[in-house]
Image (tube, grey):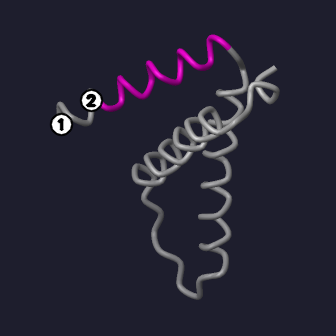
Amino acid sequence: MKIKLVAALLLCTFLNGCASTSDKAAKDFLDGASSSAESRHMEELNKKYPNKPDHKNDFIEDTMSGALTALFRGIFSSDEDNE
């Protein structure tokens, strides 16, 4: 439990630091999270017998997808993209 709390706090600190310098990190985070939600929604529509949604796991999946998107776009984007 403590490990999850520490990881969540570190992630929030990282995202707040990125977002305070530029709104690009926040947009990247939201882009990744919404993309994850959209793909899960499309999978559910294509299933013959959809599962009961687990909102807690969906939230965690979307958050991690958004964080990874913001992280990788921040690392691999050029300086010209950040301006």
Report the front residue among 4 and 47. Answer: 4
Q: Which residue is mark 1?
A: 1
Residue 70 as seen in the image, left or right of residue 52 = right
- The residue shown at (47%, 74%) is 51
- Asked if the magenta segment contains residue 11, the reply would be yes
- The residue shown at (27%, 27%) is 6
Which amino acid is tagged 1? Met
| 23 w.r.t. 59: above or below | above
Report the front residue among 62 and 46. Answer: 62
Range of the magenta residues? 7-21
Task: Confirm or deny contact between disc 2 and disc 1 (CB under 8 A).
Answer: yes
Image position, residue 78 (x, y; %): 74, 32
Residue 10 as seen in the image, left or right of residue 29 = left
* SS for callout 1: loop
| 17 w.r.t. 3: above or below | above
The secondary structure that most of the magenta stretch takes on is: helix
Dot 2 crowding, Cα within 10 Å, few <14, some 14–19, many 20+: few
Which amino acid is tagged 2? Leu
Label of residue 5 in the image: 2
Q: Quadrant of the N terminus?
A: top left
